[in-house]
Amino acid sequence: MAMISTLSAKSAALRLSFYGPGGTLFGIQIVNLLLTIMTLGIYSFWGKVRVRKYLYSQTEFSGDRFTYHGTGKELFIGALKAFAIVIVFWVTVVVLAKLVGPMAVLLVYPVILVAIPYALYGTMRYIMSRSSWRGIRFSFRGDLKECMKTYIGGVLLTLLTLGLYYPYFHTKMRRYWINNTYFGNIPFHYDGEGKDLFGSFVLAVLLTIPTLYLYWFWYAAKVGRYDWSRTKFSGGQFESTVTGGALLGLSLTNLLLLILTLGLAFPWVIVRSLKFQFHYLTLHGELGLSKIQQDARGLRIGATGEELAGALDVGSALG
């Protein structure tokens, strides 16, 4: 089994760093765009992999870069499977609509409610299994039934309470994602509780109109600081010092860049956002990385869930 050398990092503040220039990413995306057009969209899956490999290779932690191991072929096959699932679903809806009437369309909502956690679950498993640092793979080992139960229950309770349950939903889902994520054979740990965010959430709702929605940046920053303060790995403790003002400033400048360049600055927006996140995030403590061993589970996981997530436009599990 592969082993990682011990870091003498006791009480040290370790940071992620991103070194890639936006210009290089812009070049990659321009080539991806041209090849995607020439292949009628087929190359987009290989293009997505090129971007990920670049972003991973430019991200450094404790002197070593991350590696992305996914392939365009995996994403393409996953997309075909996701497309087949969507087609079968809509054909079923159309057939039922002809047999039992327009009420059959109501089936769309419960199916989407089930499809979203399935897609997020598949995305998390795939992305983690294709990510590594110092030759050691990440993995996600959560149970799909638990994911379904937590997500669907959380959505329904949030609707029934007119949104008031959302902080509890947020922390329960994050606990599920984080506590089932491993680096090698060592899990991450999150112990946040919704009650700790409830008061801030209610305040954000009350201040929505008086502050023209701007207070939500301060709420988002507080949630970010809280979530990382409740996240641990081995002997290390994460800490975020992001502020609402900084988050607002990033969002406004990114929006301005996109407007002034008609979207051409998007690669620089990605780079700026990554550097921003890493600047405010640190990991303290003695990690004991010598205890970490390679774990090969999950290496054959397919990309169907990720492509389904793209079709549903639900992003990734951790946002």
Image (cartoon, grey):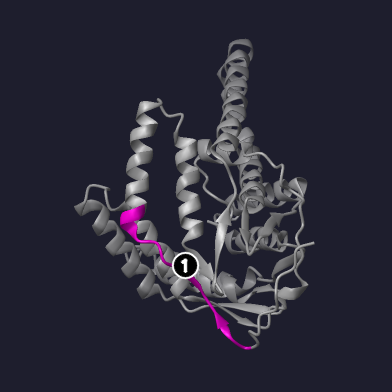
Quadrant location of residue 211? bottom left
Q: Is residue 154 visible?
A: yes
- Badge count: 1
Up the image or down, 245 lies above or below 294; here it is: below
Mark 1 secondary-structure assignment: helix
- Whether residue 6 appears in magenta in the rendering, the answer is no
Q: Magenta segment: does it hold 16?
A: yes
Query: What residue would you read off at disc 1?
Result: 220
Give the x, y percent position of residue 184: 73, 62
Left of 34 or right of it: where is 316?
right
Going 29% across and 57% down the picture, which residue do you hit? 255
- 259 in relation to 242, above or below: above
Q: Which residues are magenta?
A: 11-24
Q: Quadrant of residue 7?
A: bottom right
Under mark 1, the amino acid is Ala
User: Where residue 90 sits: x, y (%)?
Assistant: 57, 22
Residue at the far left: name it. 260
